[in-house]
Image (cartoon, helix red, strand yellow):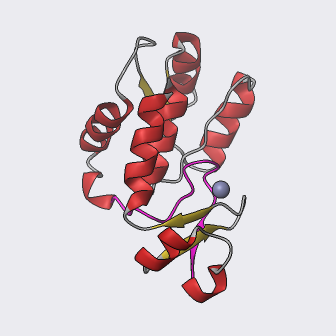
Amino acid sequence: MLGRVARVLRIMGFDTEFFRDEEDMRILARCLRERRILITADRELYRLAKGWGLKVILTSPHRIDPWKFSEALLKALGIEDCKRPFVRCPRCNGELVEVDREELVGFVHPYVWNRKEKFAVCKECGQIYWEGTHVERMRRRLQED
Ligand SMILES: [Zn+2]
């Protein structure tokens, strides 16, 4: 469930790491080192994080709407005005760099290429995104999961 929240937060432009099957100590160390806010549904991890003096939010492990949850989270943290869409790859958290559309001839479907002005590529995984459909497409994909 939190994996979907992570993708939504990336769509909104936030640097968001997602840990699965990672040791608690490693998670805590990374949060501390990179000054990250920890969001977890694990009570034990929550308790440990508090002990480490980390900023941590405990969520319920029940089904949550990732979009509503993310909006509420930003509001609670007072950073709802910090959204910057189109800067993070929802898939891997890599940085998106804008590319000249001429460079993408043959790499994106001509239908898209002809209709979109702004394109970006993920520096990490190479995924190509275009503005407009970027958010809608991800929203659809998240609903399909
Ligand atoms: Zn990527």
Count of marks overlaid on the render: 0
On whether residue 1 falls in the magenta region, the answer is no
Q: Is residue 63 above or below residue 29?
A: above
Viewer can see residue 12: no
Residue 23: x percent and y percent?
A: 75, 23
Q: Nearer the viewer, residue 77 or 63?
A: 63
Q: Place residue 5 in its image quadrant.
A: top left
Residue 112 or residue 126, whichever sits in front:
112
**Numbered range of the magenta stretch:** 83-100
Residue found at x 58% / y 18%: 45
Confirm whether residue 26 shows in the render. yes
Q: x%, y% of residue 7?
A: 50, 42
* Magenta stretch secondary structure, dominant: loop
**14 or 45: nearer the viewer:** 14
Q: Is residue 21 above or below residue 129?
A: above
User: Residue visible at 53% across and 59% down?
Assistant: 88
Q: Is residue 124 above or below residue 120?
A: above
- Spot occupied by residue 78 in the image (x, y as percentages of width and height): 26, 48
- Is 40 placed above or below 102 here? above
Q: Is residue 89 magenta?
A: yes
Q: In the depicted view, which residue is nearer to us: 139 or 3?
A: 139
- Residue at figure coordinates x 42%, y 68% from the top left: 131
Q: Quadrant for ligand 1?
A: bottom right
Left/right placement of residue 139 relative to residue 129 reads: left
Residue drawn at x 67%, y 41% is: 30
In the figure, is residue 91 to the left or right of 119?
right
Residue 33 horizontal side relative to residue 133, left or right? right
Q: Provide residue 29's location: percent of width, then percent of height.
A: 69, 37
